[in-house]
Amino acid sequence: MVGWNTGDDGTVPIDNGFEALSDPYRRALCRYVLRTDADIVACEELVDYLADEATVATGTTDRDRQTLESALHHRHLPALVDAGVVEYDRQSGAVYLDRDATAALLERVRATVTNLQNAPIERERDDQ
């Protein structure tokens, strides 16, 4: 079913895209998807990538890494799955990356923001 919140072609709701991009770790994961040549990566590789990113920004301890790994499994990967940019096999830990879907999502978000910026404000007038 295509609703008001989906693309004309039935793509995932744009709100899922905004939700996916609302977190800096998920934005970093989208960058990773766009920059890597791999189609499938182990979840551990993504934890390593995010830990390296966090270390550069703030410094990361082993405890932080464990927290990050848990957040990746329970929050970040599910949000990216909901946005349609990855598939995640919890049992094997394999993450299937979709560069085309990630690029398409970013384009839809950009187009939505542009549309909002350019939309006229129409108000009903009480005196008519």
Image: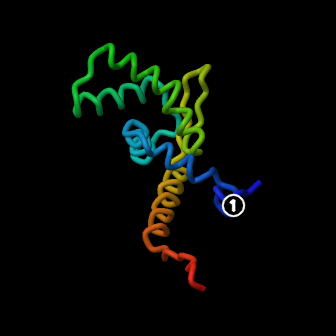
**Which residue is the extreme one toward the top?**
63
User: Within the image, what quadrant is residue 61 found in?
Assistant: top left
| Residue situated in front as seen by the camera: 42 or 66 | 66
| Residue situated in front as seen by the camera: 62 or 75 | 75
Does 6 sit above or below residue 72?
A: below
**Label total for image:** 1
- Callout 1: helix, strand or loop? loop
Left or right: 9 in relation to 97: right
- Give how far across and how far down residue 18 sits, in percent: 49, 49
**Which residue is the extreme one toward the right?**
1
Q: Quadrant of the N terminus?
A: bottom right
Colour convention of the picture: rainbow
- Give how far across and how far down residue 64 sits, in percent: 33, 19
User: Within the image, what quadrant is residue 62 found in?
Assistant: top left
Residue under numbered circle 1: 9
Q: Amino acid at mark 1?
A: Asp
Q: Quadrant of the C terminus?
A: bottom right
Left or right: 60 in relation to 113: left
Q: Residues within 10 Å of mark 1 (few under 14, many from 20)?
A: few
**Which residue is the extreme one toward the front?**
127
- Give how far across and how far down residue 79 sits, in percent: 54, 37
| Residue situated in front as seen by the camera: 106 or 21 | 21
Does 110 sit above or below residue 20?
A: below
Name the residue at 47% across, 27% down.
72
Name the residue at 46% across, 25% down.
71
- Give how far across and how far down residue 12 sits, in percent: 63, 50
Name the residue at 52% across, 54% down.
105
| Residue situated in front as seen by the camera: 3 or 126 | 126
